[in-house]
Image (cartoon, grey):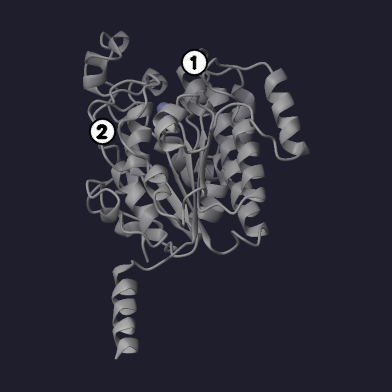
Amino acid sequence: MKKYLLDVALLAFFSAQTALAADNVVLITIDGVRWQEAFSGISAELATHNEYSTAAEQLMAEFWHDNPALRAQKLMPFLHNTLMQQGTVVGDHSMGSCAVLTNNWNFSYPGYNEILSGVVNDAINSNAAVPNPEKTLLELLSANPVFSGRVAAFASWNVFPAIYNVQRSGIPVNVGLMEQPANEFEVMLNALQKDVSPHWPAVRHDAFTHHYAMSWLKRTESRLVHIAYGEPDDFAHEGDYDEYVLATHRVDGFVEDVWNTLQSLEYYKNNTALFITVDHGRGEHPADAWLHHASQRAVEGYMTGLAADYPQGIVGSENIWMAAMGPGVPAHGLVPTSNCVGANQIAATLMRWMGEDYTQYNPSMGKPMAEFLP
Ligand SMILES: [Zn+2]
């Protein structure tokens, strides 16, 4: 009898768990790469623009093709040749595939909060490094012993420790030197990062973010790692389309390196899923709007400098894209969406992949996206 009761209890316990698709997840965010470039490749108008490009010949030689699909392959070969073949992608807005921000700002901190916490909080209304009142999925999962101490983030933008509220959450978020380098490679990365001249005061080179994250994956058995690349957005704000394109192409290569590295490591091989997205889009019309991203509300308050030229905000900058591959992720390629999927659904989707029910952590999160589930 006792044995029977135990079995019933175990059965109830296991059926309450959602199906496990992936043991581990690597979340990748790429700041401000437009869906237009991701799915149609470079813009000839911007690549050859007097003001926005000093490398027109190089860009056209390396990345141009008359066919938009082949053009996109040249810019982001891993996304198109591997991820779109083996995984699922949304956000080619020209093909009826819609992914959007549900926050009403269309700039970075509100975007990352939405991606990471699954909820929109109106109090998050600037990019200031204010400790996040919301809890990210890394923090929420850390309350569970099977995730505790096995989550980490690596970011180029130095506001991420605030987005992760590291004082409260204790999540390791690397945006600078590795405090306790674990090997010669990390000692060398620290030395280089200290000595290479930074391009921006608040954003380090993505190469450092990438290689610290790779080293971490190799030396830990992590459940959830977030890698946040930042260069494309900053080059875009500076009006350097050539550098924006080259940075986007480099990040596609970094993503390929992440995937190949995972497959080369016994712990992560065949049981780790990859999710890639962006924190906002950018404008498209007029051509100059590619520099910016902001909602109407944002230009009325936080980004008033844009209000004179863009009284409606930067139209279309709420449009984002998402891509995923790995165990349990269907191989549907680009999928049309009947309703737009939202960035607030990402956190719950990643939890579902790892067998966790978001309602047990924060029922206010956007629900998992069927598009990315088996
Ligand atoms: Zn951003």
Residue 112 in which image quadrant: top left
What SS does tag 1 mark?
loop
The quadrant the N terminus occupies is: bottom left
* Residue furthest to the front: 2
| Picture disc at residue 238 | 1
Residue 93: x and y in percent read 33, 42
Ligand 1 has an atom within 8 Å of the beta carbon of the residue at disc 1: no
Q: Which residue appears at 48% of the width and 55% of the height?
A: 84
Q: Is residue 149 visible?
A: yes
Residue 373: x and y in percent read 36, 62
The residue nearer to you, when weighing 240 against 15, is 15
* Residue furthest to the right: 184
Mark 2: amino acid: Asn
Q: Is residue 180 left or right of residue 123?
A: right
Upstream in sequence: badge 2 or badge 1: 2
Q: Is residue 93 left or right of residue 153?
A: left
Quadrant for ligand 1 reads top left
Reply above or below: 12 against 256.
below
Residue 16 in which image quadrant: bottom left
| Disc number lying in front (2 or 1) | 2
Residue 148: x and y in percent read 47, 50
Ligand 1 has an atom within 8 Å of the beta carbon of the residue at disc 2: no
Q: Which residue appears at 28% of the width and 22% of the height?
A: 125
The residue nearer to you, when weighing 343 against 168, is 168
The quadrant the C terminus occupies is: bottom left
Q: Which residue appears at 24% of the width and 32% of the height?
A: 121
What SS does tag 2 mark?
loop
Mark 1 closeness class: few <14, some 14–19, many ≥20 residues within 10 Å? few
Reply above or below: 354 against 31.
below
Q: Is residue 99 visible?
A: no
| Picture disc at residue 103 | 2
